[in-house]
Amino acid sequence: MHQVVFRVLGPLDIRVAGRPIPLHGARQRTIMAVLLLAPNRVVSVSALADAVWHGRPPATARNQIAICISALRKTFKDRAGAGDILVTGHPGYLLHAEGHRIDAVEFEERVTEGREAARRGRPDEASGRFEEALAMWRGPVLEGIPAERVEAEAARLTELRLSAYEEYAGIRLRLGRHRELIGELQSFMRAHPLREQAMAHLMLAQYRAGRRAEALETFRTGRGLLAEELGIDPGPALRELHAAVLADSPRLSAPDPEMTLGEVVPLPGHGERGVRAGFRLGYRDLSPSAARMFRLLGLLRVPDFAAWVGAVLLGIGPAVAEDVIEQLVAAQLLEPFPAVGGRVRYRFQNLLRLFACECALEEETEGERRAAVYRAYGAWLDLAAEAHRRLNPADGGAVRARGASFALPAELAEGQLADPAGWFESERACLISLLGALETGAAPTDGRWAVTRRLVAYAEP
């Protein structure tokens, strides 16, 4: 049985191993939405019928609900080998979530963990938990499913998201990140102009960044909106902050600079920290084999690669490797592009390559990392040597790297070298990178590889 990932923090999205599971028709989508908002709890047939038919179910509603449930069970069994996700329980059905993932559940768990970390005086940890929680949101909850029960739960989750963001912003202020917060909070306030907590955070961030006049203007604008929209004045906390800004109160000073030091080196660039959180969510949804291929590919110092490289890294067949790589493409962790001869090659965006390398450093031992790179580079050299031999039969094995034979599967070698000259053309940039890595010692040669410069005649333009 495969793990199913259910995402409701945005349009309904259900995936297995990074691939979407399609639902057929509005009824199936509505039934799944209602069950997902109450995981492991029985939802009555009448509640499901009310959601599907907006409070006016037909006399055949019970039978039609049963037909939809049966079709959904078949879909999960066929796509994920999971026939027990939807369980009958009087007086209706429940979604059995054990062993599977629901983003709304994980969101609430991360928020709870963030609050607990903040309570224990661990602001860096708290910031990370809130960051992960907020990165799960892709849009309005279950967008496009108009059912009263869905809309009520969507409103609850949305309010929790807004509160979580305000708490996240407050923690980052404690960590001295006021400058990076100003633009974010201004955008947040444009969308939610009556939230006084966010208004206070923006005023404090502006004041700490030396923009006192802007902080006072934020208060004046907010006070006017509160009076116009709700007929009320700002609350006492906001008024006290306004008075403190006017008085240049020392208690508004930024916290100790040492509090800004985190434990994680940032990537360069319900924005680098948010970028990493988004990457990690996509990475977590991968099957184990796709996750390992992703992090091992990140270790290779090449501009792009073909699917056979993934086969070598994981020790699997080319067809299986293509399937695994397609999971990475579906998760938007790799980018495909057409290459010479109509073949498809793949590449990382720069930040994703760095993230993949981070994952490899965290989850693979040094020996595993070296062995994977050794296999991939050795395979490139062996294929290059065999391609050269086919183009120059008189040379025999003169250019084969000493001690670098990897006994590639015959189907892999034959599939790549049917057109040796075309293979060299496709792999030109990689071979140049590889030769450079060998010459500088960046590739794990162990003192045993020797590559003749004859290969460069093919690699260099």
Image (spheres, helix red, strand yellow):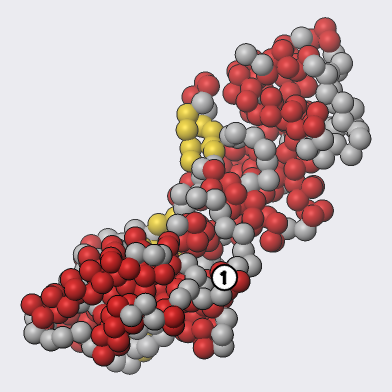
Depth check: give the residue in front, 103 or 321.
Answer: 103
Q: Residue at x 10, y 81 (%)?
A: 227
Residue with the most extreme top position: 394
Count of residue discs: 1
Tell me: 61 left or right of 391: left
Q: Residue at x 51, y 76 (%)?
A: 255
Residue 460 position by quadrant:
top right
Q: Position of residue 19 (x, y in %)?
A: 44, 55
Depth check: give the residue in front, 349 or 331.
Answer: 349
Depth check: give the residue in front, 400 or 94.
Answer: 400
Q: Position of residue 234 (x, y in %)?
A: 20, 84
Give the secondary structure at mark 1: helix
Q: Amino acid at mark 1?
A: Pro
Q: Position of residue 271 (x, y in %)?
A: 45, 57
Quarter of the image with the C terminus in it? top right
Q: Position of residue 353 (x, y in %)?
A: 58, 46
The reply to whether residue 137 is visible in this rendering is no
Depth check: give the residue in front, 349 or 316.
Answer: 349
Local crowd at mark 1 within 10 Å, few (<14), some, or many (≥20)? Answer: few
Tell me: 392 left or right of 305: right
Q: Residue at x 73, y 39 (%)?
A: 376
Q: Which residue is mark 1?
A: 257
Residue 93 position by quadrant:
bottom left
The reply to whether residue 332 is visible in this rendering is yes
* Up/down of 43 relative to 260, above or below: below
* Up/down of 90 relative to 159, above or below: below
Residue with the most extreme front position: 247
Q: Residue at x 85, y 13 (%)?
A: 396
Tell me: 262 left or right of 342: right
